[in-house]
Structures are given as structure tokens and as C-alpha cells.
Image (spheres, rainbow, N blue to C red):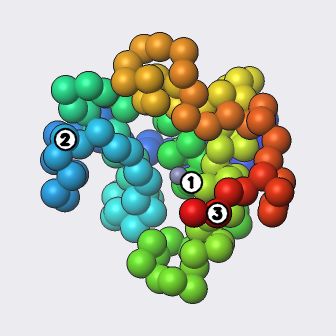
Amino acid sequence: MAGLGFRGLDRPFPSVVNARACGGIDPCETAWYDPLFPHAAGPGLMVFGAGPALNLGLDGSLVYHEYLHAVIGLTAGLGDDFFDRDLFFSLALGEGFADYFAASLSGDPRLWRYASAGGAAAGAARSLADFRGWPEGVESG
Ligand SMILES: [Zn+2]
């Protein structure tokens, strides 16, 4: 991120990999960024779960994505309370920004290929190569 002029996270950044317990999610095959986790180096924690089918710490695009949540939190201030309904749209923007910069920094528009394939395969849960505008590209349930 220093190449983009951002040095706000040039510090040790706590992360947990191979997490087996995820607050009731079992197996813990998920990942997240916790902006409020207190740490001596500064707030924030990335968690990458692992279960019988997946170890999410092995998905490079997901590591980029979660780290970029920290960058976005420090630069854009879109909010950090996932339970605040008033932050729904700003947190959704944060998801989009994290995907965009993960793809840009990795040089690959296909995200979460490992995670979506249930292991080391070539699928992609999200792809920025597929343009979808609103409302034409959004299906309603
Ligand atoms: Zn995210």
C-alpha cells in the first residue's frame, strides 16, 4: 500500500489462521476482519478459519480482501458496526472496495478461487471481469 501513498498500517498486524472456533459457526470455514479488536500495535484483527474442507488462510485474494477492510476503515471511515442497520449501504461499499483493490493488487479479477472451489482449484466466487450494473444486472428474489 506504500506504493499508493498509504502507510497507515505499516506496523505488526495481528492475524489468526487455522481458527477452529468461530462463535458458533462450525466448521469455521469463514474469514473476517474485526476493526475493534484491541492490540498494542493498533486496533484490528484478521481471522481465517479452517475446517475439514477449507483453510481460508490459503486463499491469497481473501487475505488481500480482509486486509483491505482495515485500509478502507482507516481511509474512508465507512463504519465498523455490522449490526447497525444505518450502516448497511456504507458497509456494502466497503465490501465492493475490498474486492476491487484485492483484484487490482493481485492482478487477477477472479477472487476467492480457492475458497469457492473447496480447495486448491480454479473456480471463483467473485469476478470483477463480469460487469453487472444496477438495476439491469441484479436479480431480485
Ligand atoms: Zn469483506
* Cα distance between the residues tagged 3 and 2: 30 Å
Tell me, yes or no, whether the two marked residues, 1 and 2, touch with CB atoms within 8 Å. Answer: no
Amino acid type indicated by mark 3: Ser
Q: Position of residue 22 (x, y in %)?
A: 22, 51
Is 25 situated above or below 109? below
Does residue 29 appear to the left or right of 121 in the view shown?
A: left
Q: Nearer the viewer, residue 81 or 37?
A: 81
SS assignment at label 1: helix
Relative side of 131 to 80, left or right? right
Q: Name the residue under label 3.
A: 140
The answer to whether the residues at label 3 and label 2 have Cβ atoms under 8 Å apart is no
Residue 69 at x, y percent in the picture: 56, 54
Q: Is residue 81 visible?
A: yes
Place residue 103 in its image quadrant.
top right
Question: What residue is pinned by disc 2?
Answer: 27
Residue 104 falls in which quadrant of the image? top right
Q: Which of marks 1 and 2 is nearer the N terminus?
A: 2
- Distance from disc 1 to disc 2, alpha carbons, whole Å, reads 24 Å
Residue at (34%, 44%) from the top-left corner? 30
The disc placed on residue 69 is 1
> Does label 1 point to a residue whose CB lies under 8 Å from ligand 1?
yes
* Residue farthest along the bottom direction in this orientation: 86
The disc at residue 84 is: none
Q: Do the residues labelled 1 and 3 touch (CB within 8 Å)?
A: no
Q: Give the SS element for disc 3.
A: loop
Q: Is mark 3 within 8 Å of ligand 1?
A: no
Foreground of the two, 17 or 126: 126
